[in-house]
Image (cartoon, rainbow, N blue to C red):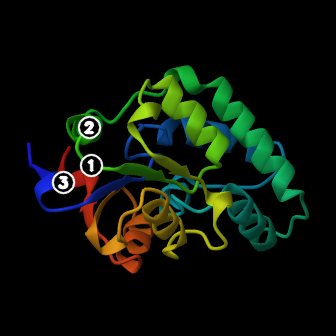
Amino acid sequence: MENLHQQYDGLIFDMDGTLADTMPTHFEAWSRSMAQHGIDFPEDRFYALGGVPANKIIDMLAKEQGKVVDADAIAEAKEELFLQLLGDVQPVIPVKAIAEFHREHIPMAVATGSPKWVAEKLLKALGIREWFGAVVGGECVPNPKPAPDVYLKAAELIGVDPKRCHAFEDTKLGMDAARNAGMAVVDIHTLL
């Protein structure tokens, strides 16, 4: 296994689709929640918007489809449904192995577009919360991915210069966010 702590001072992981194989479960929760409001959210679009906070996605889709909805309420209902389905979620094994290998050697954080409370609950369910010095959710920063905010905040909270961090991501938006923060990026699809 690559010995990242000789090259970098911090590791920052996206959560959904990177540390945890949550995307099928999220898509199920999204599909049910959006259908209740007559909003179409095709699977390819779902994956393309990975990392964008739920309320921003709902606002955008509702506007495109001529619907008026309470995006925050739908986002909250979607997250509640996701939590009901949490037992289905498994870790992404190669990424979990990297985090486990480095957890006692390098400061690590999670930088996600999901709400922080959801990330905390999922990390605890996977038994890996204590590995990370910080968890930064989408609502913790002013601008979502691909803006660098969530990655910059995560680096700040673990006390590491962003340029000395290695980021792990599964989506183009997330990779752009980490690169915009000045971090080296690992596309986790190269590890699978």
**Would residue 1 appear left or right of 119 to someone viewing this image?**
left
Q: Is the residue under label 2 in contact with that under label 1 (CB below 8 Å)?
A: no
Residue with the mark numbered 1: 106
Q: Amino acid at mark 3?
A: Thr
Residue with the mark numbered 3: 190
Pinpoint residue 93: horizontal percent, then vertical percent.
27, 32
Residue with the mark numbered 2: 104
**Would residue 129 appear left or right of 55 to someone viewing this image?**
left
> Quick one: quadrant of the C terminus?
top left
**Mark 1 secondary-structure assignment:** loop
Residue 87, compared with residue 108, is above or below; it is above
**Mark 3 secondary-structure assignment:** helix
- Which residue is at a point 63% across and 73% down the rendered structure image? 143
Q: Residues within 10 Å of mark 1 (few under 14, many from 20)?
A: many
User: Could you say which disc has been placed on residue 156 in the image?
Assistant: none
Q: CA distance from mark 3 to mark 1?
A: 22 Å
Q: Amino acid at mark 2?
A: Glu
**Would residue 83 appear left or right of 12 to someone viewing this image?**
right
- Which residue is at a point 27% across and 49% down the rendered structure image? 106
Q: Amino acid at mark 1?
A: Ile
- Which residue is at a point 53% across and 69% down the rendered structure image? 145
Q: CA distance from mark 2 to mark 3?
A: 24 Å
**Mark 2 secondary-structure assignment:** loop
Pinpoint residue 111: horizontal percent, then vertical percent.
48, 56
Q: Nearer the viewer, mark 3 or mark 1?
A: 1
Q: Mark 3 or mark 1: name the one nearer the start of the chain.
A: 1
Residue 49, compared with residue 1, is above or below; it is below
Q: Is residue 98 visible?
A: yes
